[in-house]
Image: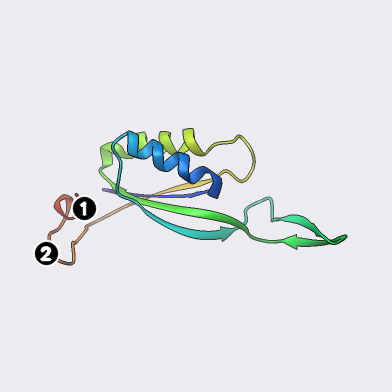
């Protein structure tokens, strides 16, 4: 099993969600995030005064999937979230050793179906 964690632009989330659902991928966890990369934020203007916006709003999407599904999901994330501009986000892939359903104590594949 793999954990796919994608940090994406908030405006890309709805299209990604619909794309994942239409391709049969339903289980995910979503949380709000903020961060900065090499672009180090940006400048804003309010009433004639400039100010630094150090952290940009992002959405974190996490999924636990079978090893065989990993590349397809990576392709979908890139398809729906890429604008070609700096700040499109990142995808992190981790190995998952085990999954346990708290209610029934099922483990492995049975726990995340």
- Which residue occupies 41% across, 35% down? 76
Q: Is residue 43 left or right of residue 11?
A: right
Foreground: 35 or 28? 28
User: Can you see residue 92?
Assistant: yes
Quadrant position of residue 72:
top left
Residue reaching furthest right? 48
> Residue drawn 18% across and 62% down?
101
Query: Is 110 located above or below residue 49 in the figure?
Result: above
59 in relation to 81, above or below: below
Q: Is residue 9 visible?
A: no
Q: Nearer the viewer, residue 30 or 37?
A: 30
Q: As displayed, is residue 103 above or below residue 76? A: below
Spot occupied by residue 39 in the image (x, y as percentages of width and height): 69, 50
Q: Position of residue 58 (x, y in %)?
A: 55, 54
Count neighbours of disc 2 (C-alpha within 10 A) and say few if under 14, some if 14 to 19, many if 20 or more: few
97 left or right of 28 in image: left
Find residue 94 and name its label.
none
Q: Is residue 54 left or right of residue 58?
A: right
* Residue at the bottom extreme of this rendering: 102
Mark 1 element type: helix
* Residue found at x 48% / y 46%: 13
Q: Which residue is under mark 2?
A: 104
Residue marked by disc 1:
112
Q: Secondary structure at mark 2?
A: loop
The percent position of residue 104, horizontal first and vertical second, equals: 11, 64
Relative side of 38 to 109, left or right: right
The image shows residue 109 at horizontal and vertical percentages of 17, 50
Mark pair 1, 2: CA separation:
12 Å
With respect to residue 87, does 42 lie above or below?
below
Please report whichever mark, 1 or 2, sits nearer to the chain's N-terminal start: 2
10 Å crowding of disc 1: few (<14), some (14-19), many (20+): some
Label count reads: 2
């Amino acid at each position: 099993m793999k954990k796919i964690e994608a940090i994406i632009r908030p405006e890309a989330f709805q299209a990604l969600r619909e794309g994942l659902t239409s391709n049969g991928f339903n289980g995910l966890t979503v949380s709000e995030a903020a961060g900065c990369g090499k672009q180090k934020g940006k400048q804003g203007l309010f009433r004639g005064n400039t100010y630094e916006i150090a952290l940009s709003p992002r959405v974190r999407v996490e999924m636990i999937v079978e090893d065989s599904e990993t590349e397809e999901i990576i392709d979908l994330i890139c398809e729906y979230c890429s604008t070609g501009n700096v700040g499109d986000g990142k995808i992190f892939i981790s190995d998952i050793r085990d999954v346990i359903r708290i209610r029934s104590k099922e483990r492995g594949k049975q726990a995340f179906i």
